[in-house]
C-alpha cells in the first residue's frame, strides 16, 4: 500500500479522490436518514475540494498520494452526514485562508490582508467559536511581515468593513440585541463524554510522535520546511483552541484539523526508516479512522471495555 501511495500525485488525482470520497459517504449514509441541507453541504464539499489542492501549495509531502489518501479517510470518518452551516462556512474559509497565506508570491500575500480580514469576519459571524484564527493571523503577520503595523491595519480594516455592514443590516431588520454567543468563552463546555473520541488514541499518539520527531531533527530541515511546518503547527493550534473550548459532543469540529493532521502524518510516515514501519503505520491510521466511523454510529464501548 505504501509503495502505491508514495508515488507522485498530479492534478488529475484530485477528482479521483473526490469521487472516491463521495462514493464512501454515499454508501455509508444509505443507513443514515439525516436530512441533507443542500446549501451547507455544497459549501462543505467546495471547502473539502479546495483542501485537496492545498497539499501541493503547502508542499511538505513531496506531492505524494499519501496525504491525499489520509485526508480522504479523515473527512469520511469525521463527516456525520450533514453539517451545520457555520461549520461548513468555516471549512470553506479555512481553505481560502490557507490558499492566500501559503501563496509563494510575497506581494500577493501583503495585498491580501484586507481580504483575509473580510474572511475572518464572515467566519466569525457564521461561527463565533473560530475567533482563535484571528490570533493565528496576527502571529503570522508579526512573524513574517516587514510592515507589521500596516498589515495589521489592513487586517482590521477588512474586519471593520464586514462588521459595519453586518451591524447596519441587522439594524435594518430590527435586530438590536447583542447575542452572547459572539463573546469569547461564553459557550465553553468541558468535554464530558470521551466515547468515541477515545478510539482516536492511536492517531493522537502518531501525531504527538510526529511533532516530537520534527523538533528532534529540526536542525536537519531546510529553512523553508521549518517555516512551513511552523506555519502548519500554528494554524493547527488555533483550530485546537476552538475544538478544546467548544467542541463538546459536536465531534464534526475535528474536521477543522483533518488537513493539517493529514500533512503531519503523511510526512512522518514517509520519513520512517524501515519500509515495514511505513506499511504498518498506514494501515493502523486507516483502520483507526474506520473504527472511529463505526464507533460514531454503533456502540462499540462494551467491545473495547470502556
Image (tube, rainbow, N blue to C red):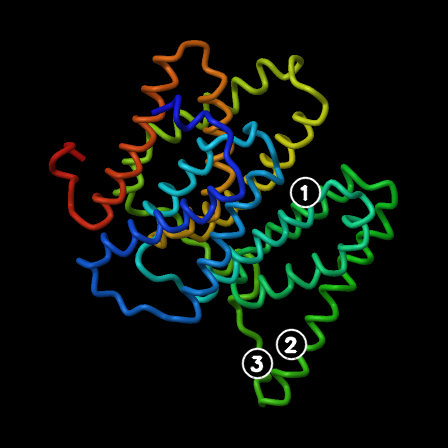
Residue 287: x, y in percent?
27, 32
| Residue 177 disc label | 3
Figure check: 66 above or below 11: above
Q: Quadrant of the C terminus?
A: top left
In this rendered view, identify the residue nearer to me: 267 or 10. Answer: 10
Query: Residue 248: in sight, yes or no?
Result: no
- CB atoms of marks 1 and 3 within 8 Å: no
Q: CA distance from mark 1 to mark 2?
A: 29 Å
Residue 201: x, y in percent?
33, 31
- At 53% from the left edge and 69% from the top edge, which residue is drawn? 180
Q: Tag 2, which secondary structure? A: helix
- At 34% from the left edge and 47% from the top edge, which residue is drawn? 20
* Sequence order check, earlier mark of 3 and 2: 2
Tell us which disc is closer to us: 3 or 2: 2
In this rendered view, identify the residue nearer to me: 24 or 144. Answer: 24
Q: Tag 1, which secondary structure? A: loop
| Residue 102 disc label | 1
In this rendered view, identify the residue nearer to me: 32 or 150. Answer: 32
Q: Quadrant of the N terminus?
A: top left
Name the residue carrying label 2. Answer: 166
Name which quarter of the figure residue 285 lies in: top left
Amino acid at each position: 500500500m505504501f509503495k502505491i501511495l508514495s508515488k507522485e500525485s498530479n492534478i488529475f488525482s484530485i477528482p479521483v479522490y473526490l469521487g472516491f470520497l463521495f462514493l464512501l459517504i454515499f454508501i455509508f449514509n444509505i443507513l443514515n436518514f439525516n436530512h441533507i441541507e443542500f446549501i451547507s453541504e455544497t459549501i462543505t464539499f467546495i471547502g473539502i475540494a479546495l483542501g485537496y489542492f492545498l497539499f501541493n501549495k503547502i508542499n511538505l509531502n513531496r506531492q505524494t498520494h499519501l496525504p491525499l489518501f489520509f485526508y480522504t479517510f479523515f473527512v469520511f470518518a469525521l463527516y456525520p452526514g450533514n453539517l451545520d452551516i457555520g461549520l461548513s462556512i468555516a471549512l470553506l474559509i479555512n481553505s481560502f485562508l490557507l490558499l492566500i497565506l501559503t501563496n509563494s508570491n510575497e506581494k500577493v500575500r501583503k495585498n491580501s490582508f484586507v481580504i483575509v480580514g473580510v474572511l475572518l469576519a464572515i467566519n466569525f459571524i457564521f461561527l463565533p467559536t473560530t475567533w482563535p484564527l484571528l490570533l493565528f493571523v496576527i502571529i503570522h503577520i508579526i512573524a513574517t511581515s516587514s510592515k507589521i503595523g500596516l498589515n495589521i491595519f489592513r487586517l482590521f480594516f477588512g474586519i471593520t468593513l464586514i462588521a459595519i455592514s453586518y451591524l447596519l443590516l441587522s439594524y435594518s431588520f430590527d435586530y438590536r440585541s447583542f447575542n452572547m454567543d459572539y463573546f469569547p468563552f461564553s459557550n465553553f463546555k468541558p468535554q464530558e463524554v470521551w466515547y468515541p473520541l477515545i478510539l482516536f488514541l492511536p492517531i493522537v499518539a502518531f501525531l504527538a510522535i510526529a511533532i516530537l520527531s520534527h523538533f528532534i531533527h529540526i536542525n536537519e530541515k531546510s529553512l523553508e520546511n521549518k517555516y512551513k511546518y511552523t506555519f502548519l503547527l500554528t494554524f493547527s493550534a488555533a483550530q485546537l483552541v476552538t475544538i478544546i473550548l467548544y467542541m463538546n459532543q459536536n465531534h464534526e469540529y475535528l474536521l477543522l484539523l483533518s488537513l493539517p493532521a493529514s500533512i503531519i502524518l503523511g510526512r512522518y510516515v514517509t520519513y520512517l526508516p524501515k519500509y515495514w514501519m511505513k506499511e504498518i503505520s498506514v494501515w493502523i491510521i486507516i483502520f483507526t479512522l474506520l473504527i472511529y466511523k463505526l464507533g460514531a454510529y454503533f456502540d462499540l464501548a462494551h467491545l473495547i471495555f470502556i
